[in-house]
Amino acid sequence: MPDRQPALSGRTLSLERIPPLVSLGLCAAIWALVYAPALTFSVSDFLRHLQPWLDHIRANGGFAALSGDFSEYAPPYLYLLAALSYFDFPFNDQVLIKLINAPFVLAAAIAMFFICRHFGKGRNTSAAAAACTILLPTLAVNAFVWGQADAIYSSLLLISALLILKKRPYWAVAAFSASLCIKLQSMFLAPFILLMVFAGRIPWRALLLGPVVYAASILPAALIGRPIGELLRIYLVQGQFYNTLSFNAANPYFVLDHVFKASSNWQVYKYVTLAGLALSSAVGALISAIGVGRRAFSDRAVLIAAALSVTVMPFVLPKMHDRYFIVADLFIFALAWIDRRFLWAAIAIQVSSGLSYAPEFSLYALPGAPGDWAWAVLVAAAINAGIIAHLALSLKSELGRLWDLEAFKHLIPAPRVAKG
């Protein structure tokens, strides 16, 4: 059963008087005015990567081209490009690449609707939340300005959380695994998935779906002729493309790069990266351990824990990009519709993400605009730290305490006492 706690009743966003069609029509009109013109906006990733990949696919027989190693992306995204390569669209490839994201932005909006309904929100309010999702700045910028694939895996992660709330653990793991087949950044939700396993919301055997889904995702490329070894090493190879601790990601590694120039020294970069990976593993383990010994895990705690996981992990991981907080943007946006106490956190993380995007957009700035936006990313990192603290304290308030120490004692076997 969904949470219908009295504490929520006075903290909802009251939009029940607005018909769903009005919400949808208004948001669609705003989208058309603000984001539709951006479909033709040229970005470097499209020119350097996506356009050459699409050209290669067309020149080498569509799906047949996927037998070669020409892209560092996982096969499922390339399947989409290959399928679209057979059609002649009345718009250019730049628009085509961006419109690939449209169904997934819609999927995120639908998931938002059902999350709100699950928490007892009215149909009109839930429809307004769904309609506003398509206008969420970071989601829309990623999908329709930059044309990145972040909207694809982010929508699947939100669907995974919804399925956990609906007590569909196998489908939840399948959605998470499908997201992981698109982008490795889906691992931001992995500590939460393990937390749900420890809390009894997901059975251990459901995790077996992960390898099955991943194997199914690479099977078509393998049948076409791409070596299995290459397909299994895709994510390992991705990590070797760039040697920078932070690509304007609003986390402590940006401070190390901007203030101390850590990435300019190979030895320093290497050891900080290894330390960061160790730190992130420890933090992920701590988040997962919150579920140990808990069987009374409220739905609201589920959503807060998911938001905490996807916000903390890109904050403590090295080699993150500016746009990798998009999942956190989406989950905290959902929290704001459930409980107004998270409204400022939702606004703050949009501001944070916008500030971290500033250096990228400064490349396209008008003459005379400020060129050094490092200060903006530093401010964004401080904002993110505050949001993480807020989420952790909110989860503690919901659970009473973050870790059940008594439960940990039961995990440690008692020492045997020698007889006689």
Image (cartoon, rainbow, N blue to C red):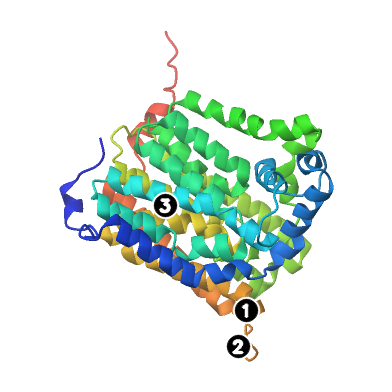
Query: Which quarter of the picture shows residue 358?
Result: bottom right
- Between the residue at mark 3 and the residue at mark 1, the CA separation in whole angstroms equals 30 Å
Which mark, by number, is residue 304? Answer: none
Count neighbours of disc 3 (C-alpha within 10 A) and say few if under 14, some if 14 to 19, many if 20 or more. many
Residue denoted by label 2: 369
Element on which disc 3 rests:
helix
Residue kind at label 1, given as amino acid type: Ser
Can residue 130 be seen here? yes
> Pointers 2 and 1 in contact (CB under 8 A)?
yes
Query: Which quarter of the picture shows residue 187?
Result: top right
Element on which disc 2 rests:
loop
Q: Quadrant of the N terminus?
A: top left
Q: Image point 48% across, 67% down: which residue? A: 32
Q: Is residue 339 left or right of residue 224?
A: left
Can residue 245 be seen here? no
Q: Earlier in the sequence, mark 2 or mark 1?
A: 1
Residue 172 picture location, percent across and down: 45, 35
Residue kind at label 3, given as amino acid type: Ala
Element on which disc 1 rests:
helix
Residue denoted by label 1: 362
Residue denoted by label 3: 109
Residue 112 picture location, percent across and down: 38, 50
Q: Nearer the viewer, residue 242 or 418?
A: 242
Residue 350 picture location, percent across and down: 44, 67
Q: Nearer the viewer, mark 3 or mark 1?
A: 3
Count neighbours of disc 2 (C-alpha within 10 A) and say few if under 14, some if 14 to 19, many if 20 or more. few
